[in-house]
Amino acid sequence: VARAQGERGTGMSRFASRARRHSDQIESKKNRFVNESVLFALSRLM
């Protein structure tokens, strides 16, 4: 039973890591856009 739970756990963690990597790509794109717009606003203010 423990081995079956462990195999199911590895499958879930593999799926979770894939989903997390996908969300990280989206977040990095969004953060890069926010950072560029903030830097642009700061350069306009200076």
Image (spheres, rainbow, N blue to C red):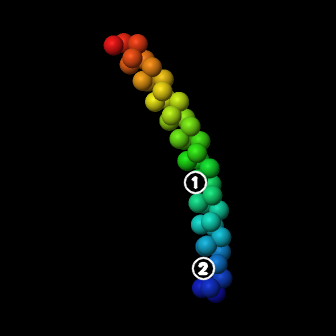
Residue labelled with disc 1: 20
Q: Position of residue 33 (x, y in %)?
A: 53, 30
Q: Position of residue 26 (x, y in %)?
A: 59, 42
Residue 41: numbered disc: none
Q: Position of residue 12 (x, y in %)?
A: 63, 67
Q: Secondary structure at mark 2?
A: helix
Q: Residue at the left extreme?
A: 46
| Count of marks, rendered view | 2
Residue 13 versus residue 33 in the image, above or below: below
Q: Amino acid at mark 2?
A: Gly
Q: Residue 30 falls in which quadrant of the image?
A: top right
Q: Residue at the top extreme?
A: 45
Residue 6: numbered disc: 2
Q: Residue at x 50, y 35 (%)?
A: 31
Q: Earlier in the sequence, mark 1 or mark 2?
A: 2
- The C terminus, quarter of image: top left
Name the foreground residue: 43 vs 8.
43
Q: Position of residue 20 (x, y in %)?
A: 58, 54
Left or right, 3 with respect to 36, comes to right
Contact between labelled residues 2 and 1, with CB atoms less than 8 Å apart:
no
Name the foreground residue: 13 vs 25.
25
> How far apart, in angstroms, are the residues tagged by discs 1 and 2?
20 Å
Q: Residue at x 48, y 27 (%)?
A: 36
Left or right, 8 with respect to 35, comes to right
